[in-house]
Amino acid sequence: MKRAIIIMTKIPLAGTVKTRLQSFLSAEECAELAAAFLMDTENKAKTVCNETIIAFSPPGKGMELENLLQYEHEFIEQTGADLGERMFNAFQFAFEKDLDAVVMIGTDSPTFPPEFIAKAFEFLEKTDAVLGKTTDGGFYLIGLHRLKREIFENVEWSSPNTFAQTKRNFMHLNFDLREILAWYDVDEPADLRRLCSEFQINESARHIAPQTFRWINRHKTFPKSGE
């Protein structure tokens, strides 16, 4: 089965990434943390699949990513009026390469195990689609064996309804959908506390996201409850 992983990412520029953490971190620190997330996501993807596509925004900044990342990837600019359209266009680009299965991930869940991506590809050998839910109601992974524009329509993106509405679209299209284990995104200070706690107690997480662990350990970034 010909397969690929798409990584959807923003270029880690100060003031444009992880902005909901700026009540605790500086804009520069948010950019550094986002870069660590991206590098760990890159490494995780490459452990599962050699064919990787980086779909980035804003446009015209791809060289900065090439200088940051360790491995070879295909780079494409994100295009579209909203996140759903950008995701559809990235999937369409991938499927035009005559692939059988494509898994898309973001960079906001640095510690989810690479085995989850492998499981998604395993499911896609027998099913149409795979979703991995986030604890805030979105999803951190979406995998497709076939593509329809309607998957990404009428969805409130970056909301507690995102997962449920995307799942509804799959049901309306009569897609055979499988789900993998839920995980969490790191968007708010409470999520950063959770990440720090996971690193403290879970050695596996430190291996899955070593760049992120080193950044947090170097900055001693353990926000207190309520920050």
Image (cartoon, rainbow, N blue to C red):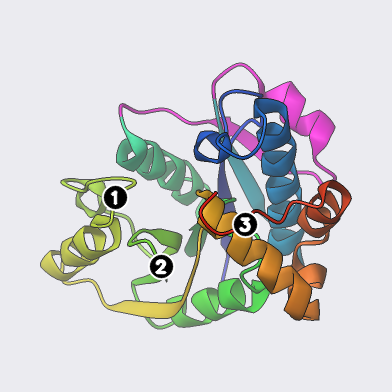
Crowd class of label 2 (few under 14; some 14 to 19; many from 20; radius 10 Å): some
Residue 15 visible in the picture: yes
Query: At 66% across and 24% down in the image, what residue appears?
Result: 14
Residue located beneath label 3 in the image: 224
At which x and y percent is residue 10?
Answer: 57, 34
Q: Relative to 184, is 60 above or below?
A: above
**Residue 47 sits in quarter:** bottom right
Numbered tag placed on residue 2 in the rendering: none
Pointer 3 local density, CA inside 10 Å: few below 14, some 14–19, many at least 20: few
Q: Position of residue 70 (x, y in %)?
A: 85, 45
Q: Which mark is residue 159?
A: 1
Q: Image check: 184 left or right of 206?
A: left
Left or right: 216, with 81 as reference point: right
Q: Gap in Å between the C-alphas at discs 3 and 1? A: 25 Å
From the viewer's side, name the closer residue of 30 and 3. Answer: 30
Figure check: 89 above or below 183: above
Q: In this view, does 214 lie to the left or right of 51?
A: right
Amino acid residing under circle 3 = Lys
Span colored in magenta: 58-81
Gap in Å between the C-alphas at discs 3 and 2? 21 Å
Q: Position of residue 96 (x, y in %)?
A: 46, 45
Distance from Cα at disc 1 to Cα at disc 2: 11 Å
| Residue identified by numbered label 2 | 135
